Amino acid sequence: MKGKDSLQNDEEEASSSMAFNKLDKSLYAPSWLAERQVAICALCLACKLSSKLQKRLVQESVITKSDNSPVSIADFAVQALVIHWITRAFPNDHFIAEEDSTALRKDEKLLKDVTDAVNSVLSIDEQLTDSEVCDLLDLGNRHMGTNERTWLLDPIDGTKGFLRGDQYCIALALLKDGAIRVGILGCPNLPLASVPPNSHKVGCIFHAAQGVGAFVQEIERGAESYPIRVSDVSDPAWATFCESWEPGHSSHELSLEIAKILGVNNPSVRMDSQCKYGVVARGEASIYFRFPKEGYQENVWDHAAGSIIIREAGGMVTDGFGQVLDFSKGHYIMQC
Ligand SMILES: Nc1ncnc2c1ncn2[C@@H]1O[C@H](COP(=O)(O)OS(=O)(=O)O)[C@@H](OP(=O)(O)O)[C@H]1O
Ligand SMILES: [Mg+2]
Ligand SMILES: [Mg+2]
Ligand SMILES: [Mg+2]
């Protein structure tokens, strides 16, 4: 039988172990290392594939979706490839991705071109069939519970830029328990840095994880990562802002008007895709304005990865009312 003291000891032990558990959690917050490594690997391969496809652009392989936006072989092939890579490492994870297999299931030649493209960057023993490619694509369109680990994927963000031969990126983010935990942007046409010694190297990957920071690296597995910070310019007169290349995606007139009111003197940097978030995260521009037409609802995959990279680089991403963005409600971004 235990005396008072021994009970007291048990209580002390229990409370100290609770304290340890608390301490444990705060000291060893997840760094999402495995997820970052797998996602960076996936994007290295995906960037290799998209660069190859951008070089041999075949305009007849571009189709127009029901919302009038373009989609190419590259969008389908990259989505299938990235989902293939992530599910191999994390078979229970879910996805919300931009594309699906509907068009491919109706067009044998297009499906074959997409499967060939994916297989061109996979080893002989990993080759996928047409039907596996369709199934992988459709994994991006299953509904998930709000607490499930869910990857948000834009296989080619800035498809119009991609087709023009300009900037685009591959955007991947991990949502868990309602918040974005990891974000990766593969930007094959963006210089590694704007200043020497790395300005001549083209192509970079931005990556960030909650509480870990934001980094940039070359598009190469195992390449060294460099920490990045947003600009410390506080006087708008010295600020540079960026905005969409396409005036139909974001009003150039409105951003110019607001820039004038703020006293921004520099001309805007117009660039396709979430590459804009990367440019702001490493301090080459200080503001990203986006003013879509009234009624347009932003997709989660168009901003999730960019947002965490900005936040981890010391910046802020909000809607026009200063509210943080909610990525946890499905395809569309909600205001918190
Ligand atoms: N009407 C409208 N308004 C606002 N945004 C739209 C609109 N239409 C499309 N999109 C989305 O814009 C994504 C491309 O990113 P950006 O607009 O930053 O780049 S761009 O310079 O305009 O190409 C683009 O992403 P991708 O479809 O992945 O290319 C779209 O999701
Ligand atoms: Mg699109
Ligand atoms: Mg997009
Ligand atoms: Mg896209």
Image: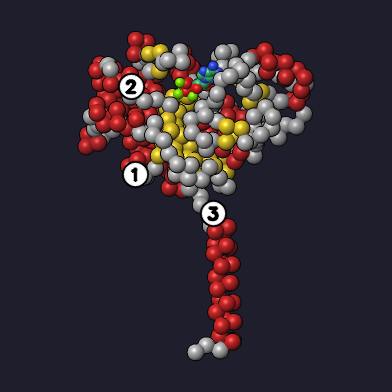
Residue drawn at point x = 75 percent, y = 32 percent: 234
Closer to the eye: label 3 or 1: 1
User: How far apart are the two marked residues, 3 and 1, measured between alpha carbons?
Assistant: 23 Å
How far from the left and from the top, in percent, is residue 206?
A: 51, 35
Residue 148 visible to the viewer: yes
| SS of the residue under disc 3 | loop
| SS of the residue under disc 2 | helix
- To which residue does mark 3 refer? 29
| Relative vertical location of residue 110 with respect to residue 88 in this rendering, above or below | above
| Relative vertical location of residue 274 with respect to residue 88 in this rendering, above or below | above
Residue drawn at point x = 56 percent, y = 13 percent: 248
Name which of mark 3 and mark 2 comes first in the sequence. Answer: 3
Residue 230 visible to the viewer: no
Name which of mark 3 and mark 1 comes first in the sequence. Answer: 3
Name which of mark 1 and mark 2 comes first in the sequence. Answer: 1
- To which residue does mark 1 refer? 91
| SS of the residue under disc 1 | loop
How far from the left and from the top, in percent, is residue 214?
A: 56, 40
Residue drawn at point x = 55 percent, y = 23 percent: 297
How far from the left and from the top, in percent, is residue 279?
A: 59, 28
Closer to the eye: label 3 or 2: 2
User: How far apart are the two marked residues, 1 and 2, measured between alpha carbons?
Assistant: 23 Å
Q: What amino acid does circle 3 point to?
A: Ala
The mark found on residue 102 in the picture is: 2
For label 1, the crowd category at 10 Å Cα-Cα, with few meaning under 14, some 14 to 19 and many 20 or more, is: few
Q: What amino acid does circle 1 point to?
A: Pro
